[in-house]
Amino acid sequence: MDLLENEKRTCLQVINQYNHKYNTAELKKMYELYDYLNIQIDNETNPAVKLQIKEDIELLMNYLMPI
């Protein structure tokens, strides 16, 4: 499984570098989604939904700003 996980991580890095280098429409949509999710989390009252939105934001941030 380690090999598969490494390959997955490598693929995501390549796609991420491409999107950032060429400032693609996909990247712009992801930033718009990030803004939208932040508005939704501020307006949400259900704790379970709020937690799911928070997890979605974290996943998106891992793509937009990798470590």
Image (tube, grey):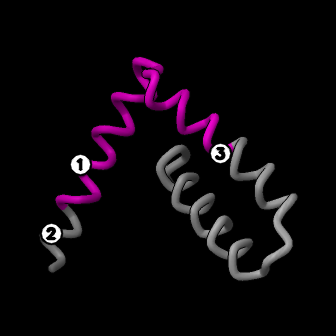
Pointer 1 residue:
11
Q: Decide which of 18, 24 is in the foreground and name it.
A: 24
User: Alpha carbon of mark 3 to alpha carbon of mark 2: how far?
Assistant: 28 Å
User: Alpha carbon of mark 3 to alpha carbon of mark 1: how far?
Assistant: 22 Å
Answer with left or right where residue 37 lies relative to residue 1.
right
Pointer 2 residue:
4
Question: Residue 27, relative to residue 13: is it above or below?
Answer: above
Instruction: Inspect the image, locate mark 2, and give the three-letter code of the amino acid beneath it.
Output: Leu
Residue at x-position 74% and y-position 72%: 50
Residue at x-position 38% and y-position 39%: 16
Image: magenta residue range? 7-34
The x and y percentages for residue 44 are 82, 65
User: Alpha carbon of mark 2 to alpha carbon of mark 1: how far?
Assistant: 11 Å
Q: Which circle, 3 or 2, is nearer the viewer?
A: 3
Task: Give the prevailing secondary structure in the magenta stretch.
Answer: helix
Pointer 3 residue:
34
Q: Secondary structure at mark 1?
A: helix
